Amino acid sequence: MKKTGAVIAAGGMGKRMGAGFPKQFILLDDKPILLHTAKRFEKCSEIDEIIVVTEKDSIALTKEILKGIKKLKAVVPGGAERQNSVFNGLNALSEDIDYVLIHDGVRPFIENSNILKIIEEVKVYKACVMGVKTKDTIKICTPEGIVADTPKCDLLWNAQTPQAFEVKLIKEAYRRIIEKGISVTDDSMAAEYMGIKVKMTEGSYSNIKITTPEDLPGAVIKRE
């Protein structure tokens, strides 16, 4: 039986949040955002293990916060860039994990139905990214701010996480881009650089990434 793991990237400092500490530790309903996120994967029947990647100085606190997460296999330190951090997480997966979902630690509203949906699709396509169709008209501008083009909205999607992959595929993709010094802003870009076709899996608009105070006005910005 094929097994699926989850790598939760929780290594950002959250400077735009202005909390003075990593945003994954902001309290939401009296619990850190990261704990809410981890619980979503803990409760999913198709997830076999969880790896969390965080800053070296936050490892002890992260382990304390997640001590009730039974599927947690390891909390590992991040690297210099996001791709290095994710690669560390991938390398911490058990050898018998066939598929992996890579998810932002500050997307605590991911729905179980969407986790299950992308797991089913990754088994077919080997590389999937969750997203939603763009609602707004998008403008492509020059560096001077002059509109150069207006692409058709029906072709545009906002990429989210989780992004799901066959483990051996995404590990090789990350190994190559790190070796070549290529920087990527999401995991699917690593697969794209290898010429791999990535399937867009439709998600939910509620699956927001908490980046600024406006994203979560009800959150309590203090440590647990």
Image (spheres, rainbow, N blue to C red):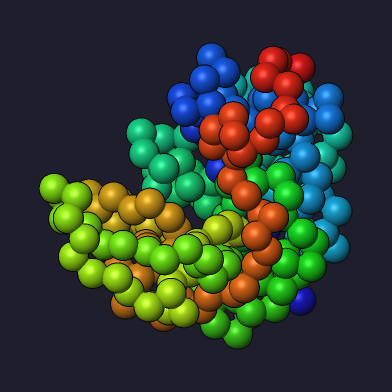
Say above or below: 23 vs 145. Answer: above
Q: Position of residue 171 (x, y in %)?
A: 45, 60
Say above or below: 17 vs 6. Answer: above
* Quarter of the figure with the N terminus: bottom right
Q: Position of residue 134 (x, y in %)?
A: 50, 67
Q: Picture quarter containing residue 151? A: bottom left
Say above or below: 153 vs 60. Answer: below
x 79%, y 68%: residue: 113
Query: Foreground: 145 or 36?
Result: 145
Q: Position of residue 174 (x, y in %)?
A: 38, 57
x 54%, y 33%: residue: 212
Q: Position of residue 141 (x, y in %)?
A: 22, 57
Q: Picture quarter containing residue 54? A: top right
* Quarter of the figure with the C terminus: top right
x 53%, y 66%: residue: 135
Relative side of 190 to 35, left or right? left
Say above or below: 103 vs 120. Answer: above
Residue 55 visible in image: no
Relative side of 71 to 34, left or right? right
Residue 143 visible in image: yes
Relative side of 67 to 90, left or right? right
Query: Foreground: 55 or 163?
Result: 163
x 84%, y 30%: residue: 29
